[in-house]
Image (cartoon, rainbow, N blue to C red):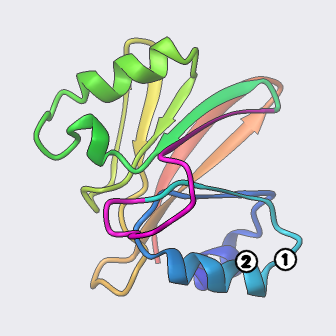
């Protein structure tokens, strides 16, 4: 996560759960960097919300870990996407599967950045927002 932040120099970051201790270390290292965070199924005793809805420069983003929306067992991601549509989101961010994924469904840009943890294939996503328009790119370290 530190390598990706150093490389990309983002204006803000999303943490999509699992590894809350690592997230706490990021907060300590980058106290001025805004973060949106949700708890994952492995973040026991976490006080973080299970989902976040925010508006960034005219783009509404729904972020969740994904385990409560059956993302591992529902390849169509209909439950997740329907929740994003219900929330009025333009973008749905999720984790849980540790697999990068990006598609447009029901008018929503659906993205899983993958896992940037200690795995063999550290990956992440970059969202670019300009004048209410959003584009995304899946990247690896």
22 and 9: which one is in front?
22
Residue at left offset 24%, top offset 56% = 97
Separation (CA) of disc 2 from disc 1: 5 Å
Answer left or right for 32 relative to 58: right
In the picture as drawn, the residue positioned furthest to the right comes out as 32
Work out which quarter of the rendered image holds the N terminus and state it. bottom right
Q: Mark 2 points at which residue?
A: 27
In the image, is residue 46 part of the stretch drawn in magenta?
yes
Along the horizontal axis of the image, is 85 left or right of 120? right
Residue 53 position (above or below residue 126): above
Q: Position of residue 136 (x, y in %)?
A: 55, 43
Query: To which residue does mark 1 refer?
Result: 31
Tell me the quarter of the picture where residue 15 sits: bottom right
**Rendered residue at 75%/57% (across/down):** 12
Q: Position of residue 81 (x, y in %)?
A: 36, 23
The magenta-colored residue range is 40-56
Residue 113 image offset from top left, x and y in percent: 43, 56
Tags 2 and 1 touching, CB below 8 Å: yes
């Amino acid at each position: 996560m530190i390598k990706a932040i150093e490389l990309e120099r983002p204006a803000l970051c999303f943490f999509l759960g699992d590894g809350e201790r690592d997230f706490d270390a990021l907060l300590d290292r980058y106290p001025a960097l805004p973060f949106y965070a949700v708890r994952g199924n492995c973040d026991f005793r976490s006080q973080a919300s299970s989902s976040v809805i925010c508006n960034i420069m005219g783009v509404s983003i729904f972020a969740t870990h994904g385990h409560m929306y059956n993302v591992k067992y529902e390849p169509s991601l209909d439950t997740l996407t329907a929740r994003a549509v219900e929330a009025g989101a333009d973008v749905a961010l999720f984790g849980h599967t540790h697999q990068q994924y990006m598609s447009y469904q029901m008018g929503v840009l659906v993205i899983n950045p993958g896992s940037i943890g200690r795995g063999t294939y550290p990956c992440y996503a970059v969202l670019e927002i300009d004048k209410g328009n959003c584009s995304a790119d899946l990247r690896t370290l």
